[in-house]
Amino acid sequence: MAILNILNYPDPRLHTVAKPVKEVNVTIRRLIEDMRDTMYNAPGIGLAATQVNQHIQLLIIDTSETKDQLQVFINPKIIAKDGEQIYEEGCLSVPGIYENVTRAEKIVVEALNQDGEPFTLEAHGLLSVCIQHEMDHLQGKVFVDYLSQLKRTRIKNKMLKLKRAM
Ligand code: K1U
Ligand code: ZN
């Protein structure tokens, strides 16, 4: 079991665009295990490889109450979107900050699983929000990027103050 370091906003490495995974091999599977332990330990309901300073297209999610339904998405692509929903989002890279973000209500996503097998999933509600939030991380985007300049500056200053106090 390894708990990985989670990058904190405004770390510039959070704005790195992730590269596609070429092969789902033992290195990727080990990273998935470490990311799973890191996400459950935080605790969180999602984690993108970007947040643990690995700039590859890999994200994991578990929105279940029982925390035993890990979903792995490698090289995810949204192939359809519909509707709109507003959800008060959090982020393990921006601890203590929760803000409303508007996203698609329904998405259809194609990805590879941990065995390198392709799958297609239709997601709604929190799962849909979480996939979109984690896919943003892979594009170097943090949820605070949807907020006003004023709110973003306040959050950035709060995070830098927290870092100095540590
Ligand atoms: O990307 C991340 O940092 C993970 C993030 C996922 C997320 C949450 C809410 C909306 C969109 C995306 C988190 O997991 S923040 C922590 C959190 O929401 C939570 C933690 C424990 C129990 C339930 C929720
Ligand atoms: Zn996040």
Image: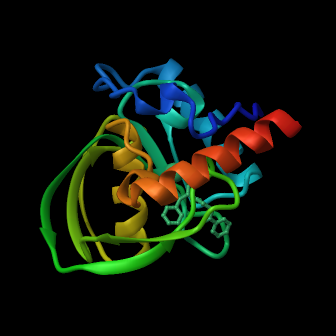
Q: Is residue 147 left or right of residue 9?
A: left
* Residue 101 in the image, given as x and y percentages of width and height: 39, 69
The answer to which of 145 and 75 lies nearer the viewer is: 145
- Farthest residue, direction right: 166
| Residue drawn at (47%, 57%) of the image | 150
| Residue drawn at (22%, 67%) of the image | 107
Q: Quadrant of the N terminus?
A: top right
* Residue 37 in the image, given as x and y percentages of width and height: 70, 43
Residue 120 appears in the picture as rendered: yes
Q: Is residue 127 left or right of residue 22?
A: right
| Residue drawn at (32%, 72%) of the image | 102
The answer to which of 105 and 96 lies nearer the viewer is: 96
Tell me: residue 36, above or below residue 22.
Answer: below
* Residue 134 in the image, given as x and y percentages of width and height: 42, 50
Q: Quadrant of the C terminus?
A: top right
* Residue 77 in the image, given as x and y percentages of width and height: 20, 47
- Farthest residue, direction front: 150
Q: Tell me which corner region of the image, top left, top right, bottom left or bottom right, holds residue 122.
A: bottom left
Tell me: residue 141, above or below residue 152.
Answer: above
Tell me: residue 65, above or below residue 27.
Answer: below
Q: Is residue 9 left or right of residue 113?
A: right
The answer to which of 115 and 129 lies nearer the viewer is: 129
Residue 143 appears in the picture as rendered: no
